[in-house]
Amino acid sequence: MTLRELIQMVVVLTIVTSVCAGGLAAVKLATREQIDYQQIKFIKEPALKKILADYDNDPISDRLQVVTGKDARGRDVKTTFFLAKKGGTVKSLAFEASGPGYGGPVGVMIAIDPQQDEVQAVAVTTQSETPGLGTKIVDDPAFPAQFANKPVSANFNLAAAGGQIQAISGATVSSNGVSAAVTRGVELYQNVKSQLGL
Amino acid sequence: MESVLTAILTVGAIGMLAGLILGVTAKIFYVHVDPRIGQVSDILPGANCGGCGYAGCTDLAAAIVQGNAPANACKAASDELAQEIAAMLGISVDTQERQVAQIFCQGDAAAAERKFTYMGIQDCRAAQEVSGGDKACRYGCLGLGTCVRACFFGAMHMGPNGLPVVNTELCTGCGSCAQICPRHIPKLIPVSQKAATFCSSHDVGRAVKDVCTVGCLGDGLCKKVCPEKAVTIEKFLAVVDPAKCTGCGLCFEKCIPRIIQAVVLTRDSKKKAA
Amino acid sequence: MQDYLLMIVAAMFINNIVLIRFMGNCPVVGVTSSYESALGMGAAVVFVATMAGTTCWIIQKTILEVLEIEYLQTLVFILVIAALVQFVEILMQKVAPPLYRALGIFLPLITTNCMVFGVSVLNIKEEHSFMQTLVFSLASAVGFALVLLFMAGLRERMDATGRVPQLLRGVPITLITAGMMGLSFAGLLGMV
Amino acid sequence: MAARVVNEFTKGFWKEIAPLRFALGICPALAVSTKVESALGMGFAVVFVLCMSNVLVSAVRNVVPDKVRIAVFISIIATGVVIVELVMQAYFYPLFLVLGIWIPLIVVNCIVLGRAEAFARKNPILLSLSDGLGMGLGFTLSLVVISSIREILGSGTWLGMPILPEAYPGFGFLLRPPGAFVIFGLILGIMNLISARIEKKRA
């Protein structure tokens, strides 16, 4: 193979791959909004529907992203807040938080009433707990109901740790995951409330 | 806009790197490969079907360039493609005459003895494994039709006397029947060959006589009578050299079991009727 | 250690890449008519899939995720695999000619083997660590090679009996056999 | 010319219908055929990628050096696939979730690169487009046939609509991977039967 052939080969390959990547980046830019919306709609909507009661807007379109911290590499960590409105006033604010469970992190969606500073409802979104035991945090509606209608200043720890939440017997670690997630979430809410502009 | 640029630069760089590495390694680890091999494999259909008996199109291309396979060895390629290859390599397609398969055994049920009754899997290769087959003659056709099933082109069928028959019009000379037969009874011969010994037995005359009435005795009478010296005896079997044989037929008379015969290329009688 | 052992069994048999995940079926149908070529193809795939799996993992973690262009994964991976296969081919031709003669002709076919690409993507999708990637790629490829060999052996015997109905000969009976093989592999399900 | 375009288009449906005749592209044909809906989605994704790659490959066929031919073709195909991936994610998210890894795997679908190598590389753009369209629709057709059988017999529905009476227990084997292989093998056998019949009639 001659040098000329080599150069030709490299140049053609570079041009083709660059053009392909450029085209794709353009398509990605054009579809990014829509993809974000779809992902949120299909993954978060079921949980949102569960915890938001009284609203007449589309909370997925009415969402805010707020920088809530930094990760290990120093990049911003963003949290998405979904706003449920009725007649133009914000009735509740929903967002996700997570805590350590038995089989991995437990994710919960928390709805807070920003006017009253009160937790309205809590629902588990992601979990990998032991089926039949830890999964009671999802299947037993009485457990997440304990969090509802309490002011954000309340102690959301388990009763054993001095809080107000009764753990599910046989699923203490999983229960603790939920309560830790809610505690963190409420903290987060109090820290960023001023930034939300409500 | 920035993300578009990142994408273009990164993937472009990966593409360039891939091209560079390939180019440089190709240069450093250069192995001289006949460039004609690449050209030939480009002309070939590239289906890697294996019908030619080589392990893929590139392998066949190498064989064609090295002269180990004819330019028209690809079964899937049209004649024009073969001509194209031949023209490129400066050889002629016709250096190799069309070949057809013929059955080199006439020991049907009536003529050949059986050692035992074989009731196993109906496949010659399986029968061969059982005490060397049920036929008393260890060179003769076992008659279970493995070659017929191996034919891709429907050019073979089992005759009424338990021997396979080749329809030479459909036969492409691919040789799959010859390859699959455990005793290599079907053999390829040039279509122009005029006479052949339709027996495969290398046993001495006496042993042949014991097991089959139509086996070559290897007595050499045919060899003596041939004016062209086209017949030779190889391990008690008369072999006709197609290049020398004129088809005069003098040997036919001398052959006691009448197995050295004129080659009559047949069409499948069944097809004819239909 | 036990985790890796379970992963190997799962990748080789229970979630066999060919029979359960349906990847790399074309060679199973195409190359299994003889035992030798099945062996060659199997060995070539084990080699390439392991290399491709780890290379793609490194690229994903060090380039794509850092620059946040994960959506270009498909384009980049297939480019890498194509280049890798060609690279291995050139290298092998020079360094190990006997190996090249045995495996070389199968290498170009591997670029479009969905098994190699599929394993690379699965590693990312299932969030494997580097060691897991190595083990998973290798075990999946070995599972593929095993199916190829089993199938070749079965087909040689089936062809010899001549008892397969005319209409099912070739590809149809191969697929049906693959289904049966998948059922028997699924019998190991209780282990994990 | 028009006749050739039509011919290249129609050959994909019976004479050269890829998965059923040449056992090409059977991996996705087995994997996403549990439901007619996902089979249709997969089929149209392949039609799009195949048409796009055929047209582009045909367009650049005279400027690409031979040594990097495959790399260039595969980049083009991969681009098409990623476009499908993004668009599907944006507008057909549930389908995207169902097809999962099989969308990126279109890249290595033997039909796509096979048509680029065997056809588009040697033919003008219009013919390549019609070839791609025909082959892609043929692929879709085979997928729909297989998935219809699997969905109707496996779960008693077609495109999600109940077809068989409520009491039908569902033949779960067909929905599992081994069932896919067996049903596909049987379909090929039936294809052989039909072809043999047609040939007999002609002779």
Image (tube, coloured by chain):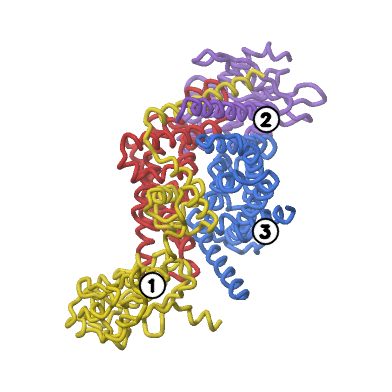
**Kind of element beneath mark 1:** loop
Residue D117 vs D163, above or below: the answer is: above
Disc assigned to residue D162? 3
Image position, residue B11 (x, y; %)? 55, 26
Image position, residue A98 (x, y; %)? 54, 25
Residue A51 vs D44, above or below: the answer is: above
Q: In this figure, which residue is indicated by the disc labeled 1?
A: B193
Image position, residue D187 (x, y; %)? 55, 63
From the image, state whether disc 2 or disc 3 is nearer to you.
Answer: 2
Q: Is A29 situated left or right of C1 in this image?
A: right
Disc assigned to residue A27? 2
Colour assignment, chain C: red
D176 or C94, which is in the foreground? C94
At horizontal 78% and vertical 29% (from top left) the residue drawn is A57
Colour assignment, chain A: purple
**Distance of mark 3 from mark 1, alpha carbons?**
69 Å
The answer to whether marks 3 and 1 sit on the same chain is no
The answer to whether marks 2 and 3 sit on the same chain is no
Question: Quadrant of residue A47 in the image?
Answer: top right
Residue B134 can be seen in this image: yes
Chain coloured yellow here:
B
Specify the quadrant that holds the N terminus of chain C. top left
Q: Residues within 10 Å of mark 1 (few under 14, many from 20)?
A: many
Q: Are marks 2 and 3 in contact (CB under 8 Å)?
A: no
Q: Are marks 1 and 2 in contact (CB under 8 Å)?
A: no
Q: Residues within 10 Å of mark 2 (few under 14, many from 20)?
A: some
C53 or C38, which is in the foreground? C38
